[in-house]
Image (tube, rainbow, N blue to C red):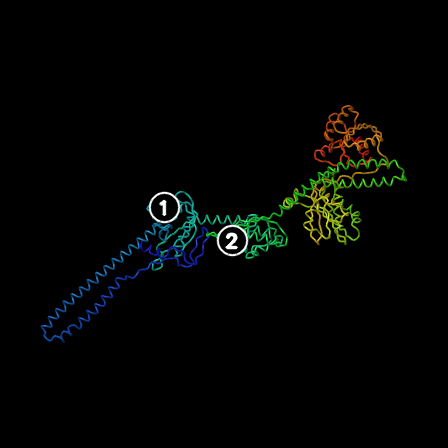
Amino acid sequence: MSEVLGPLNNGGGEIPAGANATTPGEVRSAPKPAGALTLVSSPATPASGALRIVAWYILFAALWILFSDKLLAVVIADPEARTKWSIFKGLLFVLVTGSMLYALIHRLVMRLNQARSSLLASEQQLRVIFDHTALFIGLLKPDGTLIKTNHAALAFVDANASDISGKPFWETPWWSHSVEMQAKLRQAIETAGHGQLAHFEAVLRDAHGKLRDFDVSITPIKDESGQVIFLIPEGYEVTAHKQAEAELNRLMTAIEQTPESIVITDTQGHILYVNPAFEKVTGYSRAETIGLNTRLLKSGKQDKTFYRELWTHISAGEVWRGRFINKKKNGKLFTEDAVIAPVRDENGKVVNYIAIKRDVSHELELENQYRQTQKIDSIGRLAGGVAHDFNNILAVICGHTDLALMQLSPDAPLRPSLECIQDSAERAANLTRQLLAFARRQVIEPRLINLHELVVNLNKMLQRLIGEDIELVTQTVPDLNRVKADPGQIEQVLLNLVVNARDAMPDGGTLTIRTDNVTLNEDYARRHLITPGEYVMVSVNDTGAGMTDEVKLHIFEPFFTTKEQGKGTGLGLATCFGIMQQSNGHIHCDSQLGKGTQFKIYLPRVQGTEDAAVNHETPISLPQGTETILLAEDEPSLRRLMARVLRTQGYTVLEAADGNEALALAQANGARIQLLVTDVIMPGLSGKMLAEWLSQLNPALKVIFISGYINNNAVRDAMSKPGTFFLQKPFNPLDLTQKVRAAIEAA
């Protein structure tokens, strides 16, 4: 056993220098037989020293025997005396020889005893090391039969040496739980049996049934002839190392896959690591940034004071939180929220900085859109209220002006003044319609339309509108899908966009109108707060001066304009925005200084064929009738005007100043009333509630709602019922009498 254990003390269990690491479960032969150990006989040092002394003594004795008698013959002449001296010489030789032999033998025995004691002590030390080392160590025959194993290995599986000695190693408790592990072990034993070091990773099961990771090697032991006589298996538990490695891998995987940008730098700001999210956000690859300073992202939007305060915080070991406006590789600016924290070594010294950053450009854009929507809604409510009152006033002005004009001859002196009043009132009415469109409270008449035909039909008018110095290019798709919208409103949107494009090209240029069927994916829809799906797109492109980012933030705000005073109301794009919102569509702007502007409008695709256009022929005279009409309007001057016009045309009119008064008149007159004409918004009982009450009393009653705007979906639903009509303020006597006649005669 000492011969086997002796080599272990000289590093026999180590992996040879230069051996490559193995992957888990791999069994590998050593590249050269340096891992094999050879047993050799050590020289007997004590015996060799004694032999040298004996040799010298024999040489001395031989010389004594050869020359002593001759010397006596020369010195002593008397033969008898010479005989006595010869006897004395022989006795002296025997005595000296015996003494020397005794001393030599005693010395040899002592040295042999010392060597034996030293060998026994060394063997005992090796046994202690073998039995008490934390490594799992065993001794195998070349065929894999277990001879011996140490206490650590036995305790791992709670086994007795006597129960497993003499068994094939792969059938012992360390390996019996897994056929795969047994196969790996047998392959390693075969490799070691051929004189090569075998090394592999294994999973062993302990006495409690828990699987644990081990690094295993099997070292061959050879005799002087090179024959393998023993195998020494060694096992080192690497469970904790594996767990730490797995934890590190999980951490790195999380860092690599996190959507937040992560940057690690040295204390001077030189980049040591960036994750894929950083590459995606900035456009810089990892190879491009390693070793560079983080200042490569600077946009110039933050001054030196900003960065000085940042470095003051992190240099003091504090965590810094803030917002950067940085620049991507392509030059585009983006905003990111960042947390920069110091990384300390075991002594508490700051050795690195780690920055965790999140691109918030999209969130800021959504916030701006949300604020824009809130602003527009607030102004829209105000505009709607103003338009309602203003429309009542305009309706009175328009109505009385039309009545006056109808009573005047063509050459009457007052006609030019009245016509000027009429034109001004019409301009004011158009302005209120823009306000209502912007506020998304305009009453619309949506129908299925083909935008291809709409754009083609507008071409001639658009060419006259933009002038000869601007080239108009139309690129339409003949098989364009249908949309449901108010064609008049869509025309208004296109006219506004074309006028803006014309004004952006005072020195001429190219204006391109293009249509297409498009699909808006979830990413685009999420960024622009719309529903993903199939849309019809119309784009208006110009080659004008373009806009700055600051201007683009405000273009859809009401009364915002970059035109000279008196050349724009600031309601054009705000109106477009409101119309698209009311039509369940979307409008988007792209523009760069010096590169022109592109507006895109998107309307949801619908199935079906377009509806026929409504015929608006102007009658020669006002329609007349004899029916009884209940008129409910809270604006006295407008109510009196309407009653006067209807009575002039032969109708019987019952006037009510509010909903409650109208309800009382209806209850008193019963079935006589054939038509209800009511304002939508009135104090007390609203027009919608009044119509519902009267419909219960007289289901055949026809209803005309009049209003400057519609303030909620409930009113829109009420107006969509059969037998219900709508007349928008301001209106003239012709509009009123035509709508009344159409309602009464409707089936």
Viewer-proximal residue among 156 and 191: 156
Q: Which residue shows up at 12% across the image and 71% down it?
A: 85
Q: Residues within 10 Å of mark 1 (few under 14, many from 20)?
A: few
The disc at residue 654 is none
Q: Is residue 403 left or right of residue 585?
A: right
Q: CB of mark 2 within 8 Å of CB of mark 1?
A: no
Q: Secondary structure at mark 1?
A: helix
The residue type indicated by label 2 comes to Asn
Residue 559 visible (yes or no): yes
Q: Give the mark nearest the N terminus, 2 or 1.
A: 1
Q: Residues within 10 Å of mark 2 (few under 14, many from 20)?
A: some
Q: Position of residue 729 (x, y in %)?
A: 78, 36
Q: Quadrant of the C terminus?
A: top right
Identify the residue position indicated by label 1 in the image.
155
Identify the residue position indicated by label 2 in the image.
352
Q: Position of residue 252 (x, y in %)?
A: 51, 50
The residue type indicated by label 1 comes to Ala
Q: What is the quadrant of residue 43 in the picture?
A: bottom left
Residue 487 visible (yes or no): no
Mark nearest the camera among 2 and 1 is 2
